[in-house]
Image: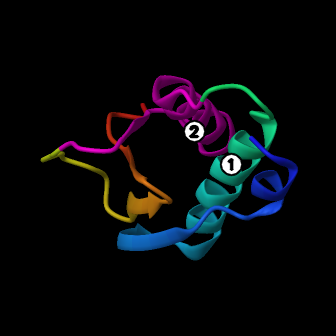
Amino acid sequence: MSAVAKKNSPKISLKFLDIDSEKAEFAQKVVAQFLDSLADSKFNTPALAKALKQAFDQRYGPAWHCAVGSSFGSSVAHEENHFIFFHVDNFAVLLFKSGNNA
C-alpha cells in the first residue's frame, strides 16, 4: 500500500441501520482503525469481522455477530436497535446483536 493510499479514508456507505448513531459511528471507527493498522499487510475479512465482534462485545456486551465480505446474502434475527449493514470501499459489513443477555 502506498503512502498516498494509506492517507485516504475508506469510503463508507451506510445501507441499512437499526442502531443508534453512537454505535454506528463506533462501528465505522473500528473499521477505519483496522484498515489503518494494516500498513502493508493484506486485507483479511475474518480478522476484521473478529475485531468488530470483539470491540462490540467488550463495549456493549455480548452477543454481537459480524460478517465481512464482497459477496454474501443474509437473513438474521436481531435485537431491536442492534443492526447495521454498510459498505466500505469494495466490501460489505453486517453487524448485529442477537442472543439472551441473561
Number of dots carrying numbers: 2
Q: Is residue 86 left or right of residue 38?
A: left
**Residue 52 tag number:** 2
Residue 10 location, x and y as percent?
Answer: 63, 61
Q: Quadrant of residue 43?
A: top right
Compare residues 46 and 9 and report the one nearer the observer: 9
Could you give the CA–CA distance between mark 2 and mark 1, rounded to whole angstroms? 7 Å
Three-letter amino acid code of the residue under disc 1: Val
For the point 43% across and 72% down, the residue is 14
Compare residues 28 and 39 and report the one nearer the observer: 39
Above or below — where is 59 with respect to 101? below
**Residue 13 tag number:** none
* Residue 56 included in the magenta stretch of the image: yes
For the point 46% across and 72% down, the residue is 13
Compare residues 55 and 8 and report the one nearer the observer: 8
Q: Is residue 7 left or right of residue 17?
A: right
Q: Quadrant of residue 97?
A: top left
State which region is magenta.
43-72
- Determine whether the residue tagged by mark 1 lies in a helix, strand or loop: helix
Three-letter amino acid code of the residue under disc 2: Leu
Q: Circles 2 and 1: CB distance less than 8 Å?
A: yes
- Determine whether the residue tagged by mark 2 lies in a helix, strand or loop: helix
* Residue 14 included in the magenta stretch of the image: no
Residue 1 location, x and y as percent?
Answer: 74, 40
For the point 80% across and 36% down, the residue is 37
Q: Earlier in the sequence, mark 2 or mark 1?
A: 1
**Residue 30 tag number:** 1
Residue 70 location, x and y as percent?
Answer: 32, 44
